[in-house]
Amino acid sequence: MRYRKLGSTGESVSVVGMGTWQFGGEWGKAFEQSEVNDMFVAAREVGITLIDTAECYGDHLSEQFIGRALEETFPGERDTWFIATKFGHKYNVPFERDQIWDADGVAKQVEDSLIALRTDYVDLLQFHSGSDEVFDNDALWERLARLKEQGKVRYIGISIGSNTNDYQTGKAPVVGAEAIQVVYNRLDTAPEEKVLPLCREHNLGVLARVPLASGYLSGKYKPGATFDSSDVRSRHDRETVERRLNEVQRIATEEVPESVPMAQWALAWCLSNPAVTTVIPGCKNVEQVRSNARAADLAGISRGTDGTTDETGLTH
Ligand SMILES: NC(=O)c1ccc[n+]([C@@H]2O[C@H](COP(=O)([O-])OP(=O)(O)OC[C@H]3O[C@@H](n4cnc5c(N)ncnc54)[C@H](OP(=O)(O)O)[C@@H]3O)[C@@H](O)[C@H]2O)c1
């Protein structure tokens, strides 16, 4: 594993983290606690320290799995993990959420997250893909600053909904945020234009989410692939998915070295952009956790044409 500093927080986090929307049950699989525990044991073995979750991956369900896993697998070692969660929604039924953005409502959500995570602090609390309208709310950011003072939250982040949202990214230093979470992968490169340069300018940490393009960039799905109705991908626009899967086939042939699993290559591709601190692939099992971690070792494989190397040794 390699580690990078998360922007101005100065915190060292693993360049490959673990995304946990999957634990909430909207990816065609219901998890058992023992499976999540095994994934945490694997994550520790491969050096993963950063875990991304949210209030609405199930009704704090993903957070509950994580809280129990932290207690049951590594009791007393809470401070060895960097736990990122989010606020802004209340889970209803699969694929439906209510929005909660008022300061009191958000403070309550944070309390619920702390209970679910079985901890008294969150490392990174992220604004969860809200509109610019709900973002522009001084009372909200003041309340978050108070939560920081109280020690319940260590750092604030913004998970931007659209990966071109330079408004919220540019405002991050004003509202006290030190990290941006953004959709960035080999198929979605729009952040390279404005968002990632802004992150570098303001020294914001970057969590690249959906780095495998919802799994399509794993290379295991061919054009025509279908998903069970309990899998969020069954709701993706059919035509767009077909176009993407065709593009993935071209990339697999023309860009991915033969000896490298495509998912690892896709994660290393994100990491080869020096603006990116960490990738947070969503994981469903121990094998995926282990395989994804190996992306950190693929220095020089993706985009490795100009031979320049950043401070962590990843060529870009
Ligand atoms: N608004 C927000 O803030 C927001 C939105 C979306 C996601 N997120 C966060 O970002 C994380 C990542 O995004 P995501 O989960 O949507 O998409 P993703 O990471 O691009 O794709 C995840 C899927 O890829 C497949 N996969 C993972 N590792 C693999 C491997 N080694 N080999 C083959 N397949 C592999 C798994 O699905 P299969 O095995 O079923 O193919 C998994 O469900 C989430 O878990 C969540 O923490 C945040």
Image: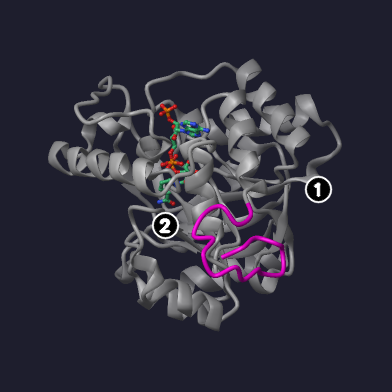
Q: Is residue 174 left or right of residue 97?
A: right
Q: Residue at x 46, y 51 (%)?
A: 209
Q: Nearer the viewer, residue 279 or 7?
A: 279
Residue marked by disc 1: 79
Q: Nearer the viewer, mark 2 or mark 1?
A: 2
Residue marked by disc 2: 184
Image quarter of the C terminus: bottom right
> What secondary structure is the stretch in magenta mostly built from?
loop
x, y percentage for residue 60?
51, 36
Q: Residue at x 43, y 43 (%)?
A: 212
User: What amino acid is labelled 1 in the image?
Assistant: Asp
User: What amino acid is labelled 2 in the image?
Assistant: Tyr
Stretch of the chain drawn in magenta: 299-316
Secondary structure beneath label 1: helix
Q: Residue at x 23, y 40 (%)?
A: 246
Q: Nearer the viewer, residue 113 or 2?
A: 2
Q: Is residue 214 left or right of residue 7?
A: left
x, y percentage for residue 227?
27, 23
Whether residue 54 is visible to the viewer of this picture, yes or no, is no
Position of 13 relative to 44 (above/below)? below
